[in-house]
């Protein structure tokens, strides 16, 4: 049990006496007031119109925590503060040090969580916009799996849609086989842009494009063959990036996989009265069950609420993104019966998902899956606008990763000029990728952030290289001590305040990790790891390790080893590795 859970277990009976069930304890915001605090007395006092400080005193009278903490204190408007006894920490540290889960409690009910992430589009290079979905989705998947849930990682590739009319026509008339061989996605993107521009001016091109699309949709063998080839070429390049980033999927099903169910999905919605015909198309309108401002099928124009229906079948009978997502949801529901589905995409798709979730709830009210749109903001360049290359092109993910490794290589070389080049390259790979990933995970996901090489690669401050360096530093302590970090199980003393603060942080890993999933915020883990590393450095400055007398030395080595493991595991949950040296 985590420290917070132990305090809560003690608090529960005391609060039950006053008819209050919500025993919640939080790490203290200011260490001067103790380690943990609860505002239960304040909430209870409000409910009972009582004096919160008096109530706090009465709760404390009924509290039995003498073996865990110093006598609890009342602070401010009625907070109850707890300061753990050194003996309590010291007696529990061996169990933490021996726990392969680092104190992370197993979930009461393991859940099936399906995560729809990355999901790039065929025939377009993966660009900087895809990095956030890929990295955020991966970190959430790793954290959920570590917590003990069953995770389904689902890459919902965009492999169907009207763009294939353009691509097919361009492929047949303009493709450059040499370019296709060296840079298939670049060539396909060129083809798309070329025909897209031409079809705007030339009605004959537009017509040819349309014919190709109709043929593809009707199952024309030649067009299907080319479409498959475009898919294959794209997937090979996506896979190369995933391999580089260390990212895997359990299922990769493109939008096209769901084509057989699209007609039926639209018809079902019509039959049960969720969708109705409007100007030849099938649309879903508001059912007026939500306040207007929360209704995704209404929009405010000049102070009036007007309908904003969701299209589920166009007048020509074609399905669209929403229809596909509905059929996909239905399939996932039938196939995995998930407790939750997370969609990790750009914030610009918020409206799409609000409509999607509302339609699905009306269609399948009994489906229990929690549906969450885990959206994120934009990566900005130094000019405060979406990050682009100098010439104004979108930045390809492969180029970005190359540059990260190159820059890290320069730094590593400067620091360790004598290491063999292959080793410097490998260290640079781990540092470069780690820096990019961490910079992406650190900001609150919903805010835009400014991309900065210098900031993300800095060896000090809240960066991946700083955390990796902290891990390397601990490894070198063990090299000097000629000791195996995995063998450190000595009794730990927390007599020094720096030891105590570090130990307290280590205990809190198990409290923090479940919170990541509550609101899908890996940034909480980034900040935890940064605080942990900072506390470690303070500890290492204040407390000699190798020069301490034998018992204390063993105690401090045990703290070092546990810190290293927590740093390494925490970074691994973010998809970030640690180099051997730096
Ligand atoms: N392919 C889409 C895009 O690049 C993202 C798909 C997200 N997933 C979904 N089920 N709609 O914007």
Image: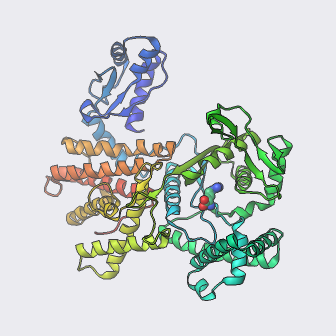
Above or below, 63 against 238 in this view is above
Identified at 79% across, 59% down, the residue is: 318
Whether residue 17 appears in this view of the structure is no
Above or below, 517 against 473 in this view is above
Residue 26 x, y percent position in the rendering: 38, 33
Identified at 49% across, 22% down, the residue is: 21
Colouring rule applied to residues? rainbow
Residue 459 x, y percent position in the rendering: 27, 62
Whether residue 30 appears in this view of the structure is yes
Ligand 1 positioned in quadrant:
bottom right
Q: Quadrant of residue 545?
A: bottom left
Identified at 20% across, 53% down, the residue is: 540
Q: Quadrant of residue 381?
A: bottom left
Task: Tell whether 435 sits left or right of 264.
Answer: left
Task: Tell whether 221 sits left or right of 564.
Answer: right
Residue 241 x, y percent position in the rendering: 52, 71
Task: Tell whether 272 sits left or right of 353.
Answer: right
In the displayed image of the protein, which residue is found farthest to the bottom? Answer: 178
Locate the C terminus and report the quarter of the image it occupies: bottom left
Residue 44 x, y percent position in the rendering: 44, 18
């Amino acid at each position: 049990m985590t420290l917070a859970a132990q305090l809560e277990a003690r608090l529960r009976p005391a609060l039950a006496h006053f008819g209050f069930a919500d025993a919640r304890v939080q790490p203290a915001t200011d260490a001067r007031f103790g380690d943990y605090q609860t505002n239960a007395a304040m909430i209870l006092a409000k409910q009972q119109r009582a004096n919160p400080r008096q109530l706090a005193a009465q709760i404390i009278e009924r509290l039995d925590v003498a073996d865990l903490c110093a006598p609890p204190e009342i602070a401010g408007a009625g907070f109850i503060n707890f300061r753990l006894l050194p003996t309590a920490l010291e007696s529990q540290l061996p169990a933490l040090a021996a726990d392969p889960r680092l104190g992370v409690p197993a979930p009461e009910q393991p859940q099936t969580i399906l995560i729809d992430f990355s999901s790039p589009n065929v025939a377009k290079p993966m660009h900087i916009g895809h990095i956030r979905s890929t990295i955020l989705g991966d970190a959430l998947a790793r954290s959920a799996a570590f917590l003990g849930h069953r995770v389904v990682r689902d890459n919902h590739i965009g492999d169907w849609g009207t763009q294939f009319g353009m691509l097919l026509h361009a492929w047949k008339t303009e493709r450059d086989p040499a370019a296709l061989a060296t840079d298939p996605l670049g060539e396909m993107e060129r083809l798309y842009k070329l025909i897209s521009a031409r079809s705007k001016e030339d009605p004959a091109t537009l017509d040819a494009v349309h014919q190709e699309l109709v043929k593809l949709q009707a199952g024309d063998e030649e067009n299907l063959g080319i479409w498959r080839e475009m898919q294959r070429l794209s997937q090979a390049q996506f896979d190369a990036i995933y391999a580089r980033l260390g990212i895997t999927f359990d299922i990769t099903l493109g939008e096209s996989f769901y084509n057989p169910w699209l007609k039926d999905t639209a018809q079902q919605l019509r039959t049960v009265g969720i969708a109705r015909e409007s100007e030849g198309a099938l649309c879903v309108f508001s059912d007026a069950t939500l306040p207007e401002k929360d209704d995704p099928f209404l929009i405010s124009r000049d102070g009036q609420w007007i309908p904003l229906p969701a299209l589920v079948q166009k007048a020509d009978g074609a399905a669209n993104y929403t229809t596909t997502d509905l059929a996909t949801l239905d399939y996932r529901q039938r196939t995995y019966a998930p407790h939750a589905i997370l969609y990790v995409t750009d914030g610009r798709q918020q409206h799409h998902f609000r409509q999607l979730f509302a339609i699905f709830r009306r269609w399948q009210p009994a489906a229990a899956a929690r549906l969450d749109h885990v959206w994120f903001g934009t990566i900005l360049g130094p000019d405060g606008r979406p990050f682009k290359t100098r010439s104004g092109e979108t930045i390809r993910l492969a180029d970005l990763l190359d540059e990260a490794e190159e820059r890290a290589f320069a730094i590593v070389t400067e620091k360790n000029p004598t290491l063999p080049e292959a080793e410097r390259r490998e260290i640079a790979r781990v540092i470069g990728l780690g820096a990019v990933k961490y910079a992406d995970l650190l900001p609150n996901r919903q805010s835009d952030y400014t991309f900065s090489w210098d900031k993300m690669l800095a060896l000090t401050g809240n960066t991946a290289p700083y955390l990796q360096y902290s891990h390397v530093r601990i490894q070198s302590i063990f090299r000097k001590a000629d000791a195996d970090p995995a063998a450190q199980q000595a009794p730990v003393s927390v007599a020094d305040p720096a030891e105590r603060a570090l130990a307290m942080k280590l205990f809190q890993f198990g409290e923090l990790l479940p919170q990541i999933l509550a609101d899908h915020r890996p940034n909480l883990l980034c900040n935890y790891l940064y605080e942990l590393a900072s506390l470690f450095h303070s500890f290492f400055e204040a407390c000699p390790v190798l020069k301490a007398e034998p018992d204390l030395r063993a105690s401090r080595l045990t703290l070092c080893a546990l810190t290293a493991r927590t740093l390494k595991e925490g970074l691994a949950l973010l998809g970030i590795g640690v180099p051997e040296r730096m």
